[in-house]
Image (cartoon, rainbow, N blue to C red):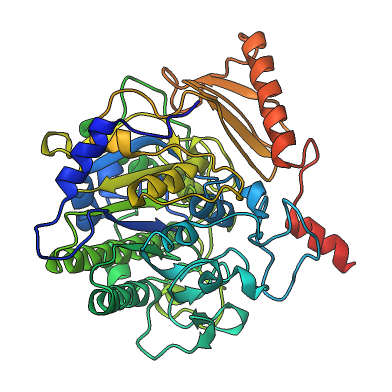
Amino acid sequence: MHRCRFSLAAVAVLFAAAAVPAGEGRAERPNLVVILVDDMGFSDVGCYGSEIATPHIDALAANGLRFTQFYNSGRCCPTRASLLTGLHPHQTGIGHMTAPPGQPLGIEGPYQGYLNDECVTIPEVLRPAGYRTLMTGKWHLGANRKECWPLQRGFDRFYGGLSGAFNYFEPGGDRGLTEGNEPVETGPDFYATDAFTDRAIEFLEETEQADGDKPFFLYLAYNAPHWPLNPKVEDFERYRGKYRDGWAGVRAGRLAKQKELGLFEGEFDPAPLVGPDWESLTPKQRDDLDARMAAYAGCIAAIDENVGSLVDHLERTGELENTLILFLSDNGACQEGGRLGSGTEQTIRHPPLRTTNGPRLGLAWANACNTPFRLYKHFVHEGGACTPLIAHWPAAIDADRRGGFVRELAYLPDVMATAVELANAEYPATAPPHAGASLVPLLTGEAGPVHDEPLFWEHEGNAAVRDGDWKLVREYGKPWELYDLATDRTEMHDRAAAEPDRTADLVARWEAWATETGVAFPERFNMYQFLNRRGR
C-alpha cells in the first residue's frame, strides 16, 4: 500500500512553517502551481544536464528539489488526464488520445477520447475547499464536448487552447484559442508562451483583488516546445550555430554535466545514439539540423524567461514562500517528424501562421534530448515516460535540503493526492479512488518511499510496471524486457531471460491491472486507426 497520509508531526511542522503573519488574513494552506511543458526531453534544462540556458528553472531547482524517478504517461493528453484526476488515463476516457476537433469518436468507455463524467479533477476538489482555480495554456482533454472544457471541470478562469497542438504566433482554424467558453482572436504581437504567462499573472492579480484571503491553484500548461517549433527570432538566434557538432557532441556534454551535478547514483551505460554519423550528412543537412535544434532550444529559452516572470510576480506579492511549484514535462522529447526532422532557417524565421505545419525536431535530436535514456514520446521506457520534476516550496523544504535530489519513485497520480493533503480537501467518495500517494513526505524530508506497491503504465500498446527497482517494459508487438534500475538505469541489459519467474510474475500483475483498468490488450486501441477505418 502507498502512504496516503504523512505523520502528525510532519503536519504540525508543515503548517508552522507555512503560517502567515497575523493580520494578513491568508489561510495557512499553501498555493499550488503546476507548470507543465510539452514534449521536452529529460535533459533539456540546465539543472538536468542541458547546455540550453535556463537560469530561472535552475533557480527553482537550486532552492528546491529535483526528482530523478518521476514518471508521466508517455504522451500529451494521457499525461494531462492522469495529472489532473489522479487516475490512470483509461479510467478517465483518454486511454489513447483525445478526439481531434470536429471528429468525435462516437464511442464510450476507456477510449472515448474525452474526459468522462465519473472522474474528478484537482480544481473540482480544491474549489469546494476554498481555493481559487486558474488555468492558462493547453487543455487537450476534449474539445468537442463543452461539458469537458476547463470551466465545466472546476476552473474559475481559463485562457488557452482546447485542442492539442496549435501555432505559437497565430493559432487558427479549429485550433484557435478560448477564453472562458468563448473563442478569442489574438493580436499582432501574440506569442503563446508569453501570453499564457501574462494571463496567468492577470488571473492571480484578480484573485488578490477579489479573493485575497483565498489560496489558489494555478495550472500553467505551455504548448512549448511541441511542434511546430516556433521560437521568437531573437531566441532562435541565441542558439543558431551552437549545434554544428551534432548529436554526439550534445550527448557527451550532457552526460558530463549530469555526472558533475550528481544527477544519478552509480555507473550506467548511456543509451546509444540513433542518428546517422554526423560527418555522413551533407553540409546542407547539417545546417538545417543545427537550425532545428536551435529553434527547439529557443522555445525552451522562452519558457524559462516566462517561469522567471511568474516567480517574480509571486515574490513581489509575498506568495512565493508558501507556494508549492511543480515543474515537469508531459512526455519525453518528440521523435515525430522523421529521423532528421523537418524545417529550414526560412521556415523558422518566417513560419506559416494559423496552422500546425512547421519545423519538427525529429528522432535523432530527440534521442540526444532524452540523454541518457532510450526511446522518446509514445513509449514508456525511461526516455518516453521519465520526466524532470522540480519542486519548489520554501515554507516546507528545509534550507539544508535545497538543491538536492529526491530519488524515490513517484508518478502523476501523486499530484492529486498531494493537492488533497495540502488543501485539507475532501476527495469525493463517489469518484473512482485516485491512484496516488502524497508527495509531501518526500518534500519535507521523511525517509522512505511513498510507494511500495507496483505502478503500472500503458500507452498505444507500450506497457510497463515498476516494482521497487525492477521494471518490466515492452514496445507494442515486441517481447517483454526486464531491468534492475538500481544497476541499469538506462535499460540497456535485459534480464528477462535470466529471471523468468520474476518476469512471469510481473507480466501477470500487469495483465491483472490492465483488465481491471479497461486497457485494450493484447490488441491495442489506436484512435487514428479507428478514425481511418471509420472513414473508409
Above or below 70: residue 292: below
Which residue lies at the image location 54% right of the left edge and 51% below the top edge?
A: 428
Relative image position of residue 73 (x, y in whole percent): 54, 45
Quadrant into which the C terminus falls? bottom right
Relative image position of residue 248 (x, y in whole percent): 39, 41
Please name whichever residue, 23 or 466, is drawn nearer the observer in this view of the structure. Answer: 23
Please name whichever residue, 486 or 390, is drawn nearer the observer in this view of the structure. Answer: 390
**Can the viewer see residue 84 in this picture?**
yes
Above or below 86: residue 167: below
**In the displayed structure image, the side of residue 524 where residue 506 appears, left or right:** left
Which residue lies at the image location 53% right of the left edge and 63% below the top edge?
A: 342
Task: Count numbered badges in the picture.
Answer: 0
**Which residue reaches farthest right?**
536
Q: Splitting the image into 4 quarters, where does residue 302 fall?
A: bottom left
Relative image position of residue 383 (x, y in whole percent): 49, 39
Relative image position of residue 137 (x, y in whole percent): 44, 70
Above or below 507: residue 126: below
**In the displayed structure image, the side of residue 198 where residue 320 appears, left or right:** left
**Can the viewer see residue 394 in this picture?**
no
**In the displayed structure image, the side of residue 191 where residue 533 appears, left or right:** right
Which residue lies at the image location 81% right of the left edge and 58% below the top edge?
A: 530
Q: Splitting the image into 4 quarters, where does residue 15 fall?
A: top left
Please name whichever residue, 17 or 178, is drawn nearer the observer in this view of the structure. Answer: 17
